[in-house]
Image: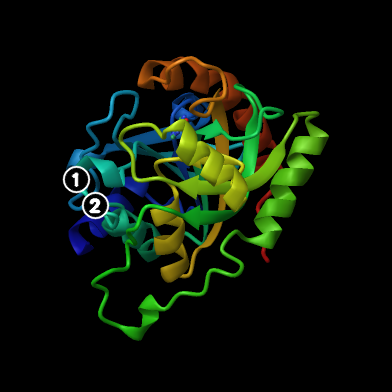
Amino acid sequence: MKEALDHLVEKLDGLAPTAALVLGSGLGGLVDQVEGARRIPYAELPGFPRSGVSGHAGEVVAGRFAGTPVLMLSGRAHYYEHGNAAAMRPALEVLAGIGISHLILTNAAGSVDSEMGPGSVMMITDHINFSGSNPLIGEPSDRRFVGLTEAYDAGLRKAIETAAKETGTALHQGVYMWFSGPCFETPAEIRMARVMGANAVGMSTVPEVILARFLGLKVAACSVITNLAAGMTGAELSHQETKDMAPVGGARLATILRRVFEEGLPES
Ligand code: HPA
């Protein structure tokens, strides 16, 4: 962790970001909006993930986004790659170590709600961990008993909601249910998810939220909806569809996030 931290600090060259974004499918292009970008491949940062998922690069991009110093993490590790729910822990520890206080996570997700179709953006208000795993398993200290009553920061959520309104961008809000993946869900699982109160389903983000709360970071998360979930249209789902559709909602989410950073992040 110290080696990665020192290397990142050196590369930041005096830049002191307090906010970081994790870019999921469809959001990768956001790094092109970073002014004065310094790019640090994950390979140079011990402990950062070696993501093997197509459509996910692996680098930290540091610079200014809409005037605000920021770190963007392009590429994440997923639980389904190696069965390690804590795969993002070293990276998130480094972020906390350099003074990041606000973390905004993005992902691609399937919608359980036929009114929220492909291309929609959903801000996550709460989650259901349906994976059977947890990134804090094995953590020996009592700090592992993290409260998740307010996992998604009220101030950040308000800022995202306001930014959506101001930019005239439709924004849904709802509950994200974490399935381990990598296969997609069955229609029966999607019916179950709906009954249980989920609005979207996906294979990432929740472990990062848990780790970030463990590390004391304020968190917000948004999904770009790439498809109606299994059994809702009759068509089979595919990773290609996720990759093809993610940029549609991704462009909308980028508009919202840019406005959030123009306004400056809330202190709350
Ligand atoms: N299910 C799980 N993860 C996903 C989906 C889905 O339908 N779409 C994009 N990521």
Q: Is residue 195 above or below residue 235?
A: below
Tag 2's secondary structure?
Answer: helix
Q: Residue at x 40, y 41 (%)?
A: 203
- Percent from the top left, x then y, of residue 225? 57, 29
What's the mark number on residue 204? none
Q: Is residue 142 above or below residue 255?
A: below
Residue 99 figure quarter: bottom left
Residue 22 figure quarter: top left
Identify the residue under disc 1: 82
Q: Is residue 26 left or right of residue 207?
A: right
Residue 141 figure quarter: bottom left
Q: Is residue 53 above or below residue 136?
A: above
Contact check, label 2 and label 1, Cβ < 8 Å: no
- Percent from the top left, x then y, of residue 210? 43, 62
Beta carbon at label 1 within 8 Å of ligand 1: no
20 or 120: which is nearer to us?
120
Query: Are there few (<14), some (14-19), or many (20+) residues within 10 Å of tag 1?
Result: few
- Percent from the top left, x then y, of residue 164? 75, 36
Q: Amino acid at mark 1?
A: His
Beta carbon at label 2 within 8 Å of ligand 1: no
C-alpha span from label 2 to label 1? 26 Å
Q: Residue at x 29, y 47 (%)?
A: 79
Query: Which quarter shows the C terminus?
Result: bottom right
What's the mark number on residue 7? 2
Q: Earlier along the polypeptide chain: callout 2 or callout 1?
A: 2
Query: Are there few (<14), some (14-19), or many (20+) residues within 10 Å of tag 2?
Result: some
Query: Which quarter shows the N terminus?
Result: bottom left
